């Protein structure tokens, strides 16, 4: 059974931020700064996205000497589909707000 | 002040020495009668000397291992490293990710904010089984703890607090296991030592029940604080036996050496009590005297020394030390209580002090003090020294052996 649940505003923001450049690998601190999120909020979201197969991760070993390898993130195919749905839902919600209430769309959200 | 290894060792030495001198001074001031001068001097010098040696060995090991990795870090980095070490293996990648990002954060306050927030994230990373499963298990644990108190209290009133505390602690271990693992399963990499410790804990609980059923008035010697302490120690023994932490390693030799040493110590303890007051033939008396004097020291020192030497590392010796103490505590406690009852039935005297006629319940207090306090503290100290010497001896024995660099590191 697929659970349909609206993701939190922060999760939506993270997914959409990653979808801005879907093929690019992003750093955690970079996302924190872009979205104004604390790591205590960002990393649990990234963990949930990765657990559900929406996010792929890798290690960046091309770092200056003495620095540890950094973790990189980007959306998987499923993650990009979700990002498209969330972007569409956001556009629809914006349009609804402009033209008056017509009921909110229920995004398909696989529990992330 | 820069916390170098030498600084930390010096501070540790002074803390141990000053704390012991104060404690010993208070004890002497309240002693009636005062002990002989030689006894007082030995008491003043020997324990802190052993503790200082053991503490310096542990620091030396730590500084050359985990400490060396964090010595170049600032406090936020160290804080995050400690939190990372507590993460379960499958979540460690995320902890390393946060630590790596911290290296990119500039500015003291920004680094602190990042580190503290990341530590919060590590504490609340989603459990693998999901929050509902964890909440369900936690609910069952709380209900079990709440039910254990009245149920046990009705049968053995003096054990009510112990039952609640023990059930709660074991339940907390189960909750932790569920939270940390996708599919919690009981791994028994060293079955014999595990069974020995588990059996010892079961025997300890059974003997406490028997003791308090036979002597209900002895419950006054198990006040709530002591009951919680007993529960914490026995639950801790179970935790080490059933879910040994990562730092205890996966080697098979140290746990077996430790378990064997604990059995020897328990046998020595039983023999020492049974031969007390008897007059065996001279050769046997000499042999017994030799065994009774040397066994307790050897039991803690030798397995740790042997494991440190065989494993070519201080850590292996430390593993044997922990297993020795973990198995020894419940075994000796489980022997103490029935032996105390037996001895008291003979002449109304205590097991630990055959000169004193006292209530039988004092055996319970003595068992707690000695088996859960003095024996493990002194035993672990001797064992740590054994582990350190074992690792050093091994290193010196093969100075040109390239592999000895591993023992140097550990």
Image (tube, coloured by chain):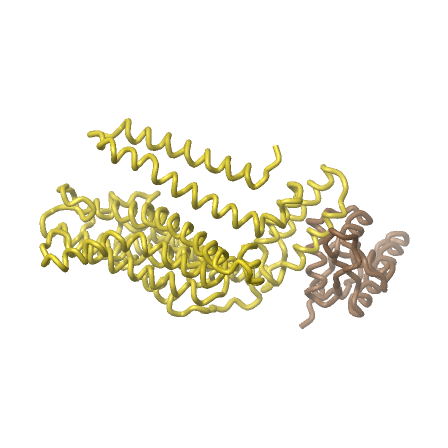
Closer to the camera, B298 or B333?
B298
Closer to the camera, B405 or B316?
B405
Question: Is residue B75 placed above or below B398 in the rendered structure?
Answer: above
- Which of the 4 image quarters holds residue B179? bottom right
- Residue B240 rendering spot, x and y as whole percentages: 43, 59
Residue located 46% across and 37% down the image: B13
Quadrant of the frame with the C terminus of chain B: bottom right
- Residue B142 rendering spot, x and y as whole percentages: 45, 55
B325 vs A40, left or right, is: left
Q: Which chain is brown?
A: A
- Residue A23 rendering spot, x and y as whole percentages: 85, 64
Closer to the camera, B365 or A65?
A65
Residue located 38% across and 38% down the image: B48
Closer to the camera, A104 or B286?
B286
Q: Colour of chain B?
A: yellow
B189 vs A20, left or right, is: left
User: In this orientation, does residue B175 appear?
Assistant: no
- Which of the 4 image quarters holds residue B71? top right
- Which of the 4 image quarters holds residue B258? bottom left
User: In this orientation, does residue B7 appear?
Assistant: yes
B318 vs B344, left or right, is: right
- Residue A57 rendering spot, x and y as whole percentages: 74, 63
Question: Is residue B225 placed above or below A48 in the rendered structure?
Answer: above
């Amino acid at each position: 059974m697929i659970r349909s649940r609206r993701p939190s505003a922060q999760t939506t923001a993270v997914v959409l931020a990653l979808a801005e450049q879907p093929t690019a690998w992003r750093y955690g601190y970079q996302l924190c700064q872009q979205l104004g999120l604390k790591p205590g909020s960002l990393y649990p979201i990234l963990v949930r996205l990765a657990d559900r197969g929406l996010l792929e991760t890798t290690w960046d070993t091309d770092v200056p000497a003495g620095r540890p390898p950094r973790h990189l993130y980007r959306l998987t195919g499923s993650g990009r589909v979700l990002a498209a749905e969330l972007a569409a839902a956001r556009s629809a919600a914006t349009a609804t707000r402009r033209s008056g209430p017509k009921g909110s769309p229920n995004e398909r959200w696989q529990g992330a | 002040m820069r916390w170098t290894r030498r600084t930390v060792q010096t501070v540790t030495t002074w803390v141990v020495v000053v704390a012991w001198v104060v404690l010993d001074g208070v004890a002497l001031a309240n002693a009636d009668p005062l002990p002989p001068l030689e006894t007082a001097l030995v008491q003043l010098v020997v324990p802190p000397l052993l503790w200082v040696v053991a503490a310096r060995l542990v620091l030396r090991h730590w500084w050359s291992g985990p400490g060396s990795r964090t010595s170049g870090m600032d406090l936020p980095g160290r804080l995050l490293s400690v939190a990372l070490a507590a993460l379960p293996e499958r979540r460690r990648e995320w902890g390393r990710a946060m630590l790596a990002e911290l290296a990119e954060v500039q500015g003291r306050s920004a680094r602190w904010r990042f580190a503290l927030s990341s530590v919060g994230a590590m504490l609340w990373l989603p459990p693998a089984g999901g929050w509902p499963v964890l909440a369900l298990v936690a609910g069952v644990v709380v209900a079990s703890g709440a039910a254990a108190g009245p149920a046990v209290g009705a049968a053995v009133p003096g054990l009510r607090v112990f039952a609640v505390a023990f059930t709660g602690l074991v339940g907390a271990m189960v909750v932790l296991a569920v939270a940390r693992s996708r599919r919690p399963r009981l791994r028994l990499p060293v079955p014999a030592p595990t069974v020995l410790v588990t059996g010892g804990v079961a025997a300890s609980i059974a003997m406490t029940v028997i003791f308090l059923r036979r002597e209900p008035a002895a419950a006054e010697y198990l006040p709530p604080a002591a009951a919680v302490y007993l529960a914490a120690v026995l639950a801790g023994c179970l935790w080490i036996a059933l879910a040994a932490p990562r730092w205890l390693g996966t080697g098979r030799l140290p746990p077996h050496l430790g378990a064997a040493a604990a059995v020897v110590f328990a046998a020595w303890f039983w023999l020492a009590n049974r031969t007390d007051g008897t007059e065996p033939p001279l050769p046997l008396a000499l042999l017994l005297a030799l065994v009774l004097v040397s066994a307790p020291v050897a039991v803690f020192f030798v397995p740790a020394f042997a494991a440190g030497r065989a494993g070519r590392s201080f850590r292996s010796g430390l593993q044997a030390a922990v297993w020795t103490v973990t198995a020894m505590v419940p075994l000796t406690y489980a022997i103490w209580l029935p032996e105390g009852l037996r001895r008291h039935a003979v002449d109304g005297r205590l097991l630990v002090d055959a000169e004193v006629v006292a209530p039988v319940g004092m055996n319970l207090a003595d068992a707690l003090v000695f088996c859960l306090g003095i024996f493990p503290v002194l035993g672990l100290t001797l064992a740590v020294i054994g582990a350190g010497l074992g690792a050093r001896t091994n290193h010196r024995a093969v100075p040109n052996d390239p592999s000895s660099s591993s023992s140097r590191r550990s």
